[in-house]
Image (cartoon, rainbow, N blue to C red):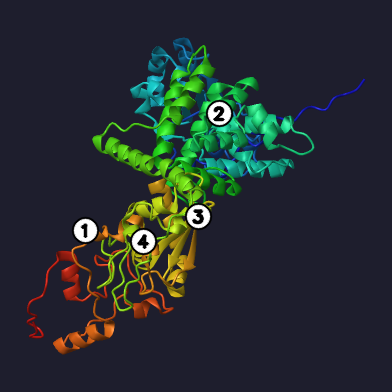
Amino acid sequence: MVVGVDAPLALYRRYRPDTFADVIGQDHVTHPLSHALDNNRVNHAYLFSGPRGCGKTTSARILARALNCEQGATSVPCGVCESCVELARGGPGSIDVIEIDAASHGGVDDARDLRERAFFSPMRSRYKVYIIDEAHMVSTQGFNALLKLVEEPPAHIRFVFATTEPDKVIGTIRSRTHHYPFRLVPPKILGDYIVELCQREGVTIEHNVVPLVVRAGAGSVRDSLSVLDQMIGGSGPDGVTYALATALLGYTPDSLLDETVDALAAADGGTVFGVVDKVIETGQDPRRFAEDLLHRLRDLVVVSAVPDALTRGLIEMPEDQAERLAGQAARLGRAELTRAADIVSTSLTDMRGATAPRLLLELMCARILLPGLDDSAAGVGARLDRVERRLSVVGTPSTELRQSAAAPSAPAAKAVEPPTDAPTPSVGDAAQVSAPSGEEASPASAEPSSTPTESLTPASVEPGGLTVVDVRRLWPGVLARVQTMKRYAWALLTQNAQVMDVGGGVITIGLVNAGARDSFVRGGHDEILRQALIDELGVDWSVEAIIDGTVGGPGRTARHLEPEQLGPPAASVAEPVAPAETPARTEEVERAKGAIRPTRKGDPAEALSDEPPPELHDDDDIIDESLTSRELLARELGAEVIQDIRHGSA
């Protein structure tokens, strides 16, 4: 005959706390009770309320053990006296500590029997402690029968009522107790506790399994340990693996959620519905899949709003997955993430009791793939404006460019070279560049076909449909977006940079010199520009910064300007633009007037230097601090100073 070895007790029984110090996540209860015990100010009746499995009955037993310890009422029982041994973990229990399940003993007769027995003195202990579990199941008549005893009990009686629904305990009983509400254990504390127990048990558990156990336990220590006990019992030589956890708990694997989110970001309906088919064919619960997707969308919303959410403990996920979540959040955007979460949440409600869950799941995915609607007039107007703007630059321009590239090349327009001493035109100064004085503009420059040759190269056409010409046309909107994010980055791009090329998922930005390029890269402004491109144009491009000496300098020619910046046709030009005075001449005139202005950022002398532009601050109202008062008035108000009282000059 083979004698079997008894199986060990369940985890939640083997690791049941013996002292208040062992109770996790309930410091707001255990600390006041410990102080009351040490100060000998224990009340005659307590009401412990809270969710299941959070330590209410366990704390009641610890309180009884601390009251009856031979060392006196103490928050730290000695553990060696008779009472401590009887009430310890796995002990036989004490005859003077009576636990009553009110679910089956909540009638008026049970209350009368308790009232009659309560007046007898304890057998061996200092106090007779009644622990009434599920106290909300006691009938109103039963509570009324106990009312007088609870209000004025004998000196040797202590009551502890434990319940998950304190509102069902009649007010006359609640008013005679000290109420301590227990709470769900925070995920971080519970996760650390699970890892500690696995180490004690000598069980290997993968790091990405712990969040699943915590989520299944929903903040209940007992439920979490029951789930962990089940997985440990079914684990193999490799311990508790992620595959085992997802199979036992029914959670959707992260790989399937990643596939779904990436497909939603790319508006790939085929992949999305393929995932739905995979969920149904593998026998997974459609509602559980929707719950897991909602949980992932919640994490993405938090990551989008708080980039360091993982380090701050706002989301429960292994650190190696943080970068993947950040990428998904950037591709979808905050508005679309919030809208998708709302749709999934509504669909979860509709799935309750549904006879066709697959249909509802597919309809949910279809609604997410459709463009969102904003009830406000501002939201609709902004969305229509963006759609119209994208439609005007995506599709047809790239087709025309391909046809132009395939056709025989027309005679190139003669580059209009401004005088070397002329002021440098900015990218935004449209229709200000014409032929030099005394030279008639070429008719070819007025034709629409005189698109810059660099825009016709294959590298300048992005597979998504945006060309370098399109990006330059939309560049003011991108700069406006950058300005809302960081004003110094906006000033740097406005005064010292231009779009050189787009292609292969990369946008090339030319900066005036090495100093400006280094300031742009070191300051992290390339990442700001990348985010602005995502928000404004919906493209996720890498930003490459190069040095282009023609940016903002005297050597910049007409080939660096957009077609609409080449000016009107020659016939419409009233008179040629006269060359501006040279910097030397300007400085001489200013010296004669008694006010020598400082060198501006756009001056050729600075454009040719390798020094970075001066540091600007985000809270400056005037970005260019080098402007004189005359120049500032002229730029902002179009005013001309007639007389300066300070210098006495006109």
Please name the amino acid that badge 1 sits on: Ser
Who's the residue at 66% across and 41% down the image?
A: 197
Question: Few, some or many C-alpha atoms within 10 Å of disc 4 (few <14, some 14-19, many ≥20)?
Answer: many
Q: Earlier in the sequence, mark 4 or mark 3?
A: 3
Q: Earlier in the sequence, mark 4 or mark 1?
A: 4
Give the answer, above or below, for where 572 lies relative to 228. Answer: below
Q: Viewer-proximal residue, 342 or 527? A: 527
Q: CA distance from mark 1 to mark 3?
A: 31 Å
Judging by the rendered image, the residue that carries numbered circle 4 is 561
Who's the residue at 31% across and 33% down the image?
A: 374
Q: CA distance from mark 2 to mark 1?
A: 54 Å
Please name the amino acid that badge 4 sits on: Leu
Question: Few, some or many C-alpha atoms within 10 Å of disc 2 (few <14, some 14-19, many ≥20)?
Answer: few
Picture disc at residue 572: 1
Q: Nearer the viewer, mark 4 or mark 1?
A: 1
Q: Position of residue 227 (x, y in %)?
A: 63, 30
Who's the residue at 36% across and 72% down the image?
A: 615
Judging by the rendered image, the residue that carries numbered circle 2 is 270
Asked whether the beta carbons under mark 4 and mark 1 sit within 8 Å of each other, the answer is: no
Q: Earlier in the sequence, mark 4 or mark 2?
A: 2
Q: Position of residue 218 (x, y in %)?
A: 53, 32
Q: CA distance from mark 4 to mark 3?
A: 16 Å
Please name the amino acid that badge 2 sits on: Gly
Give the answer, above or below, for where 440 lies relative to 401. Answer: below
Q: Nearer the viewer, mark 1 or mark 3?
A: 1
Q: Viewer-proximal residue, 291 or 448? A: 448
Judging by the rendered image, the residue that carries numbered circle 3 is 457
Helix, strand or loop at label 1? It is: helix
Helix, strand or loop at label 4? It is: loop
